[in-house]
Amino acid sequence: MKDQNRPTRRLQALRRRRRLTPPGAPPGTLIENPDAPHPKIQCIAFGPGGLTETDVASADDVPALADGQTVRWINVDGVSDTGTVQKIGRAFGLHPLALEDIVDAHQRPKVDIYEEHLLIIARMPVGHPVDGNGDTAGAKLETEQVAICLGRDFVVTFQEQPGDAFDPVRRRLRAADGQFRARGADYLAYALIDAATDVFFPLLEVYGEQVEDLENQVVEQPEISQIGRIHDLKRNLLTARRAVWPQREMLNALVRDESPFFRAQTRVYLRDCYDHTIQLIDMIETYREIASGLIDIHLSSVSNRMNEVMKVLTIISTIFIPLSFIVGVYGMNFDPEVSPWNMPELGWRYGYPAVLLFMMTIAGGLVWSFWRRGWIGKDGRR
Amino acid sequence: MKDQNRPTRRLQALRRRRRLTPPGAPPGTLIENPDAPHPKIQCIAFGPGGLTETDVASADDVPALADGQTVRWINVDGVSDTGTVQKIGRAFGLHPLALEDIVDAHQRPKVDIYEEHLLIIARMPVGHPVDGNGDTAGAKLETEQVAICLGRDFVVTFQEQPGDAFDPVRRRLRAADGQFRARGADYLAYALIDAATDVFFPLLEVYGEQVEDLENQVVEQPEISQIGRIHDLKRNLLTARRAVWPQREMLNALVRDESPFFRAQTRVYLRDCYDHTIQLIDMIETYREIASGLIDIHLSSVSNRMNEVMKVLTIISTIFIPLSFIVGVYGMNFDPEVSPWNMPELGWRYGYPAVLLFMMTIAGGLVWSFWRRGWIGKDGRR
Amino acid sequence: MKDQNRPTRRLQALRRRRRLTPPGAPPGTLIENPDAPHPKIQCIAFGPGGLTETDVASADDVPALADGQTVRWINVDGVSDTGTVQKIGRAFGLHPLALEDIVDAHQRPKVDIYEEHLLIIARMPVGHPVDGNGDTAGAKLETEQVAICLGRDFVVTFQEQPGDAFDPVRRRLRAADGQFRARGADYLAYALIDAATDVFFPLLEVYGEQVEDLENQVVEQPEISQIGRIHDLKRNLLTARRAVWPQREMLNALVRDESPFFRAQTRVYLRDCYDHTIQLIDMIETYREIASGLIDIHLSSVSNRMNEVMKVLTIISTIFIPLSFIVGVYGMNFDPEVSPWNMPELGWRYGYPAVLLFMMTIAGGLVWSFWRRGWIGKDGRR
Amino acid sequence: MKDQNRPTRRLQALRRRRRLTPPGAPPGTLIENPDAPHPKIQCIAFGPGGLTETDVASADDVPALADGQTVRWINVDGVSDTGTVQKIGRAFGLHPLALEDIVDAHQRPKVDIYEEHLLIIARMPVGHPVDGNGDTAGAKLETEQVAICLGRDFVVTFQEQPGDAFDPVRRRLRAADGQFRARGADYLAYALIDAATDVFFPLLEVYGEQVEDLENQVVEQPEISQIGRIHDLKRNLLTARRAVWPQREMLNALVRDESPFFRAQTRVYLRDCYDHTIQLIDMIETYREIASGLIDIHLSSVSNRMNEVMKVLTIISTIFIPLSFIVGVYGMNFDPEVSPWNMPELGWRYGYPAVLLFMMTIAGGLVWSFWRRGWIGKDGRR
Amino acid sequence: MKDQNRPTRRLQALRRRRRLTPPGAPPGTLIENPDAPHPKIQCIAFGPGGLTETDVASADDVPALADGQTVRWINVDGVSDTGTVQKIGRAFGLHPLALEDIVDAHQRPKVDIYEEHLLIIARMPVGHPVDGNGDTAGAKLETEQVAICLGRDFVVTFQEQPGDAFDPVRRRLRAADGQFRARGADYLAYALIDAATDVFFPLLEVYGEQVEDLENQVVEQPEISQIGRIHDLKRNLLTARRAVWPQREMLNALVRDESPFFRAQTRVYLRDCYDHTIQLIDMIETYREIASGLIDIHLSSVSNRMNEVMKVLTIISTIFIPLSFIVGVYGMNFDPEVSPWNMPELGWRYGYPAVLLFMMTIAGGLVWSFWRRGWIGKDGRR
């Protein structure tokens, strides 16, 4: 089963990884992709006064909503339909280079400062197991790109796939306590970055459990399957690290830089979110270090066991091979009748018991020599 | 026994590790935990004039004490009862984000500067073996969070679990020499940070002894159980490092930053405490490096021993297998009476002695060849 | 076949690697190489008004073209003919040290600021598999040097070998939309750097596929050939890293430095290109880390398999060697008629069945003891 | 012998390592140690005019000497008698925190700037083998703390144990050329730091020889004892590094900082001493890197030898086990007289020679197949 | 042969490594070495007008030459005659600390700024194989110190041994084109540093070839001798790195610092030389990384081969040991005539063929089971 779905997964990964823009294309190029599914567009307009939620049918309908409300949040699920992205970009005055980065979903998290808006790229795990039930535990971690464009009175977010990472933010907006709604576009952007960051926590808890499971097993029962599991875990942690590490830099830049899009009172919250990324990196690096050590421990553990196997083989062989030689000697067919020199022992009265005794002495001596070397039973271990 | 208590410990660790705040929750959220035990609150109010100690029954009673005395120190044991934390926070004007950090006990050590107070997060080992008797030697190291809020005339400390790390500070406060009492809230905060840092020293002495034990054993008697012990040690050192490393940064920030909460004369002491963290990190890194090397040495040592086992097997097999073949030959039942070509040796007068001599020659030649290769006894080693 | 073409490749590499300038030569020395093929020189002169393309026969004809057009782009394929390089250098006022760097094709990517022009050195893969079809997958990666001299109204580029990496730029220039043509020499230089950077993306996709292939195989079927493939992959990634890493620094210097050759509006695009190099480095480092881990995993995997082989050998030997000894005993030729002590068992009525039963008991006991140690079939694995 | 003195050494190390100050004690605490031996105090007072040397009986007598002479150097051998340290501290106005650092002999090298004096902590090897005769070669390196307090007209030095590292400085002071005596307290402090640094050079020469010895042996004759020696060497280098690395930082701080205690003309000499520490670190890191590589080489070397042992075993077994089977077949006792199918070969005329020939053919074929695989003698190696 | 010249080489290295100055000696001490050979002193005085070359017999004759010519270059081959060094030092006003560094030939490359002159320390390979013919390929790399003192109108260079690394510079000076001669002392110093740097290039080419040779061999034919060669290569690369790395820093300091000894127009050339050191470091680090990987690959490769050896042994043993047991059974001498239970098979009509058939069945089953596990011939490999 493993063999069958691996190639498929790999192909998918390849398709995802391949950049749409060919080398040498002019910057800001958006390649038309006629097969792209039409993205789902949702517009939430809110202010201290209230909140309106609209599902927008077509990208052309978006700008018409901009009347009377303070802040608009446009969420676009799916970026492969470049036409839609371009229309929305035009409606909000997004820079062509920003649009290229939004569509090419392989960006590292970063913040780009344009004159009219910020472009914030974040990454979050695909199929984030928020509940930690962990059926995604063994699977290969993929991250998806989230682009957040923050203008003076709007936030436009682009997700690669429909997902529910932003649902808690929506719920908090819908909750009528009004505080959130009054805090403006920059606070909304912060809340979205925070949501995209915090979904890594349940994931890392799952990885933490995997690390602990492996730790117990590797020392006590080294098996070949653990190697694959450690490798998968290391790879997933590497993927998480590639997403979170630049996210930290991005948040650091947001906290420090004096761009007008984030007000001072929101920056306190960004610092809190920055602390979360540091905590995430701390966890990732810890698990990575333990996982790296596990490979070495597995190797040592396997070598130890092989050593024990070898000892058993050597003890058995060393005791019985000489004995077999002796019995072989007395199995030779030299004719005692021809000459008194030909195996006279065979005709002795106590020949047989003497040989048995001789062999027991040899075996005893060997057992004693193994015991003295500590190969058998000396100190409770074999 | 090991197998039985591991899952339990793991579950506990998980419960401890799991963040209370779900992803996407608004910042400053304190989740109500109705089953939380009521925390123990102790208030020490002191000044150059004297010292009053009170066990506070409920969080509501705290503010009433603030009359006439210079400095109040509120110590709260247990942070899971968020209601109590919130009440105390309101009483002393603590920032909501600070309260969230206090309750979520997975923070890295850090210092956050708020307008009305500092929030200092430190970590110290749970069950710190101050006496170094070391029954916690083999156990998994856990650290608990200590939050120290320093205001102009108060210090509020939150510990996860009741513990005695602050007892020496209490004793020094109670001792009537007056000097400590006159030095103000910032000196008290310093004394608490110093106490939380210094409890790592006896712990690291225990680890240092473990390192030395393992060093001696791994080279001389490599055993599979050592692998597990080295791994446990490395993990504990990693945990200690995760606690102490950011503690150093935190102290560095306190020494350098010009916040008004620490006066210049106290900062000299902070520098001393900063030196202690550097010393701790130096010890941790040294032990970590030695422990890492031990895994490699164990592997080399096991390989060496396997090599010796193999040599014994090979020597025995190489000598006796050919000899057994020869005796096998003369055990064949070809009928010498049918033909003079059929094993005439069996009927020779000196057939048997000749074969014995032949075999002794072969064995001697093989022993000599092994000796020449240095496999046996050439230079005092086997 | 491998053995045959390796030395050739090595010799080529050597010839390429060897610096033309001997140690101690004066700086700016251009060694005459009389056997050098005459380089191909192409001149594209363009401006908002139009575009003229000329194949220049000799280096002497170049300067004559500089009339009426805004920007000239001279592309030279081949740098071994130092005479041509020198003539072109004189025509555009290039610094002697710049010319030395252009001719010595082992420079790391860098930017040198001269008074009259910038010298930008980039590197790109030789035989860049733009289509990703990957017949270069197993081959050794070589990079070639691209020198871009940017003056106020000219761009002179030197490639080591004729190649098509700049073709997309040419096509965009020829396309009559005019925007590109109006943007001046610095934008052209940017477009060329961008093209030289982006050709690494398809290459890294090929390496990414190789990494995934190896990941699957190494755990499941460790073979000796994989070692060589992992090593080749690591070496190629190292070569790519050596080219891309300083390219990033070079772009960073271009973005930050306030040289007059790049105008502010072009610098936005350079930042975009800088992001691409960061992305490239991120991919390279990830693949490098995975590839490094694969060597360890391979070793563990091989050790595991050897352990299983050893177990099979040990089980078979341990069971049959003692049994063979027993049957050997009853193959001895002691004469039962001489003495009642000589192998009386041979004459017992149930001697043979008793011995068979005895041997079956021993074999059963050994099998049970192996089963108890988990060496055979206990938990589904062998 | 090794086993016997190890615990003792460990206990000593422990006693030395254990901090005197318990966690939570007030800063500046000096624990009274009534069993401490009385330290040896020597006072050298010198100036351009002359030099007076006095052995001071008790700490109370020290201040009385301060008349007419320019510079006083007090050397105290032994810091466990805290009463003496405290008295000297009071006499020269040393800061309480400085005194705590002097008594707690586990400080890393550092410089602390107090208002009235500098506290310079350095470390030097205990039992420094200045002559390089190296009977300390295999022993565990321990470093002792040297505290140098530099005031305007005095230098107070505290050594843990009486030692002769400062003797060359004393000799230079006593030599009547006057130049040294005229240079003041800061030059004396420099000379002492320089002496404490330079004693590492002969030590590192010994380690360098050990590295070279091990290099030659590990490749040619890997033995288990080398593992232990490499580990001891690595540990000693680590200890040296822990002492020298912060010494470098300390000297760098002295060179750069503008404290009034070191005059500009002395700072040139400090820079020279700083260069020495860089050179020491360079040597240490080089030896460390080589020593780390030796562990890997040892492992590879052992594996290689095991491979050869295995080949010998496999060749012998593979040749003789099948042959033994054949001779076993003709040792079976099937009765040829009962049936013509029962081993008719035994009665053939050329049965025995034919079997011998058959076996020789098989053996020859196997030898040829091993030769073809390169297992025996193909290219000069076995 | 190897064993014989190793100790000699080691002793030489030791003598070279041992510092002349004992610990605690006063700074600026030049130890008299009466056995030192008299150094060869050459003086080249040159200016735009012409060039005079003189071999100076004694150090006392040097200053007399300073008339009318612009720049003097004094080259001293051999620094062990400290008297000569001191005389030259006095003649040109060199600082005593500079003289100590010149004589103690174990300095790392560095630049020291004195008031009257610069002291530039560089290192270059001893016996630099400029032609790359590489008979020094396997030898241990040693570097020698070159001290360059640059004053306003003089350059004094000290080499440890007579060598020809500066010959190209001399040749360029003698060449009458005048440009070099007109450029002053700082350009000469640059040319000398450049010559001392560039001699590393042919050396690294030799190492590059060694790396490639080893790469091919280690995977295809792992042998024990390669381990030693890899180690030697790594050590040589480490030595080269120790020389080049601080050389880079030294050049960087020269390029950046605004000392008056190097004029701005010469600094452009220093930047070029700085680029060369970066290129050298890039090559060294690449080779080092590959060489480090080779050790792991060698180990994996050896393990793979051992696995194959083990498989051969196991297959042969597993097939023939049970068969030998069976033939042993029928070699037992139970008396069939005594009882019908005693080995009646021996008297059966088809007993012998039946046993042969039975054994063939067993052997076939085992071969099939090995084939199914992929141990024999399944996919083209064994």
Image (cartoon, coloured by chain):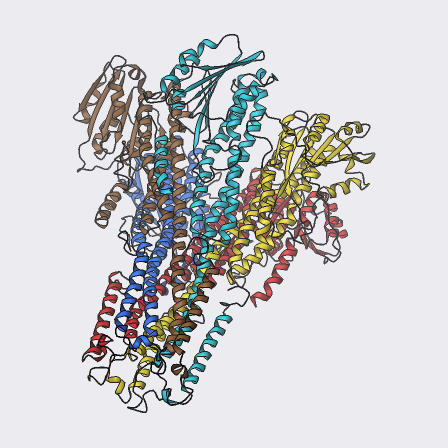
Chain colours: A blue, B brown, C red, D cyan, E yellow
Quadrant including the N terminus of chain A: bottom left
Residue E105, given in percent of the width and then of the height, sits at 62, 36
Residue C136, given in percent of the width and then of the height, sits at 54, 62
From where the camera sits, is residue B16 visible?
A: yes
Q: Nearer the viewer, residue E367 or C107?
A: E367
Q: Nearer the viewer, residue A68 or D372?
A: D372
Residue A116, given in percent of the width and then of the height, sits at 47, 39
From where the camera sits, is residue C109 visible?
A: no
Q: Quadrant of residue E98?
A: top right
Q: Nearer the viewer, residue D19 or A79?
A: D19
Q: With E107 as the anchor, is E45 left or right in this view?
A: right
C87 versus B55 height, above or below: below
Residue at the far top: name it.
Answer: D68
Residue B36, given in percent of the width and then of the height, sits at 18, 36
Quadrant including the C terminus of chain A: bottom left
E119 versus D153 height, above or below: below
Q: Residue at x 58, y 15 (%)?
A: D182
Q: Quadrant of residue E37?
A: top right
The total of numbered circles placed on residues is: 0
Residue at the far front: name it.
Answer: A340
Q: With A46 as the anchor, is A11 left or right in this view?
A: right
Residue at the far bottom: name it.
Answer: D340
C81 versus D5 height, above or below: below
